[in-house]
Image (cartoon, rainbow, N blue to C red):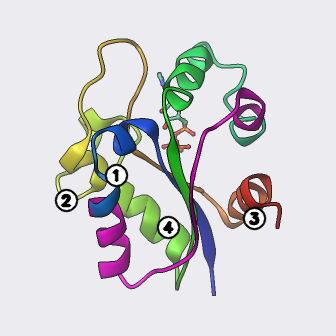
Amino acid sequence: MEKTLFIIKPDGVRRSLVGQVIERIERRGFLLERLEMREVTKDLLEVHYADIASKPFYGEVVDYMTSGSVVVGVLCGSDVILSWRKMMGATNPSDALPGTIRGDFAHASDDDSIENIVHGSDSAENAAREIAIWFGE
Ligand SMILES: Nc1ncnc2c1ncn2[C@@H]1O[C@H](COP(=O)(O)OP(=O)(O)OP(=O)(O)O)[C@@H](O)[C@H]1O
């Protein structure tokens, strides 16, 4: 069965959206294989976000992702990588369609950061890489 790493980012935890996000996951029939609340370190983020670490907005991403606890877990299910990405909606909440998590819940942020509530691995290769980074498997 396919697996993916998902994160409920600090804005999702702060705004008490954890229950609603998990409910959508369970309603869709995906199984929660791991689920933990964590503080994220800059070192872990640098590995997780290696592909964007050199971008001009990376500092905003670090401030955002270390602004509070996250909920991180592993989802299991048929075609879960792509399905979870579809459930999240577009990266920038202003482009995210209604019915998606970002389209239904994300707020515009005050600075240049994009606060978009959730994360999901974007490929099988990255899912395996990210699950290893966060859970050492
Ligand atoms: N142009 C930007 N300005 C500010 N922040 C950005 C920008 N692009 C991306 N980000 C932030 O960096 C994160 C990672 O960007 P990426 O391009 O990997 O998007 P994503 O795959 O949709 O998001 P994630 O990896 O968090 O699921 C985004 O979720 C967002 O929080």
Viewer-side residue, 99 vs 63: 63
Counting residues from the N terminus, which is met first, the one under dot 2 or under dot 4? 4
State the residue position of label 1.
89
State yes or no: discs 3 and 1 in contact (Cβ < 8 Å): no
Viewer-side residue, 33 vs 97: 33
**Highlighted range, magenta:** 20-46
Please state, as top left, top right, bottom left or bottom right, where the N terminus lies in the image. Answer: bottom right
Q: For residue 137, which numbered disc appears in the image? A: none
State yes or no: discs 3 and 2 in contact (Cβ < 8 Å): no
Label 4 residue SS: helix
Residue 13: percent from left, percent from top = 38, 44
State the residue position of label 2.
99
Q: Nearer the viewer, mark 4 or mark 3?
A: 3
Label 3 residue SS: helix
Q: Determine whether, in the image, residue 39 is placed left or right of residue 46.
A: left
State the residue position of label 3.
128
Any magenta on residue 74? Answer: no
Q: Calculate the distance from the C-alpha at mark 4 to the C-alpha at mark 3.
A: 14 Å
Q: Determine whether, in the image, residue 11 is placed left or right of residue 72.
A: left
State the residue position of label 4.
82
Any magenta on residue 32? Answer: yes
State yes or no: discs 2 and 1 in contact (Cβ < 8 Å): yes
